[in-house]
Amino acid sequence: MPHHSRMINSKDRSKILIVDDEKEMVGYLSEYFVSRGYRVYAAVDGSEALRKVETLNPDVVLLDLLMPGIHGMEVLTRIKSSHPRTAVVIMTALINETVAEEALEAGADAYIAKPFNLEKIETLIRSVIDRYR
């Protein structure tokens, strides 16, 4: 048995799709979640994110709002209409009450402001995934 398997226990190998046009952010988050036992996938823009939601059916999408091409709010709306049981967590550096409210009204399960603490975002992800279980 490989020694890393003990980290997987409670995570049940949930699938996370990280959507951000900043490659450093994608790498940073991917590395962390892989080390915590999640199955991690990435997309660098909205159209790639929508394609991957169709093929992967992730448990949660970590979605940046400001990206080239399709805006994150549009990606959120489209994910929620086609996959209502996929949790979506908005992550953005531009957090203000209006943006947060719009995202939640559009179906986001939660939002987190950048920069964030990794343990905090993992706790948030666990809670939104559990909501759909």
Image: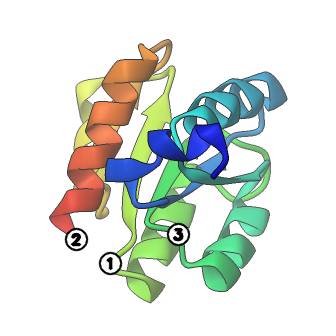
- Residue drawn 33% across the image and 80% down it: 84
* Residues tagged 3 and 1 counted as in contact (Cβ below 8 A): no
> Looking at the picture, how far across and down is residue 119, in whole percent?
37, 21
Q: At 46% from the left edge and 48% from the top edge, which residue is drawn? A: 8
The mark found on residue 132 in the picture is: 2
Furthest residue in direction front, as rendered: 1
Query: Which class describes the residues within 10 Å of circle 1: few (<14), some (14-19), or many (20+)?
Result: some
Evaluate if marks 2 and 3 touch, with contact meaning CB atoms under 8 Å apart.
no
Q: What residue type is disc 3 on?
A: Pro
Residue marked by disc 3: 58
- Image quadrant containing the C terminus: bottom left
At x 29%, y 64%, the residue is 107
- Residue 82, given in percent of the width and then of the height, sits at 46, 87
Q: Dividing the picture into quarters, in which one does residue 59 lie?
A: bottom left
Horizontal side, residue 39 vs residue 76: left or right: right
- Residue at numbered disc 1: 85
- First-in-chain label (2 vs 3): 3
Q: Is residue 47 left or right of residue 91?
A: right
Q: CA distance from mark 1 to mark 2?
A: 6 Å
- Which residue type does callout 1 highlight? Arg
Query: Which element is circle 2 on?
Result: loop
Name the spot of residue 116 as percent of width and height, x first.
44, 15
Q: Quadrant of residue 65?
A: top right
Q: Nearer the viewer, residue 76 or 2?
A: 2
For the view shown, which residue lies furthest in the left direction?
A: 131
The residue mark sitting in front, 1 or 2, is 2
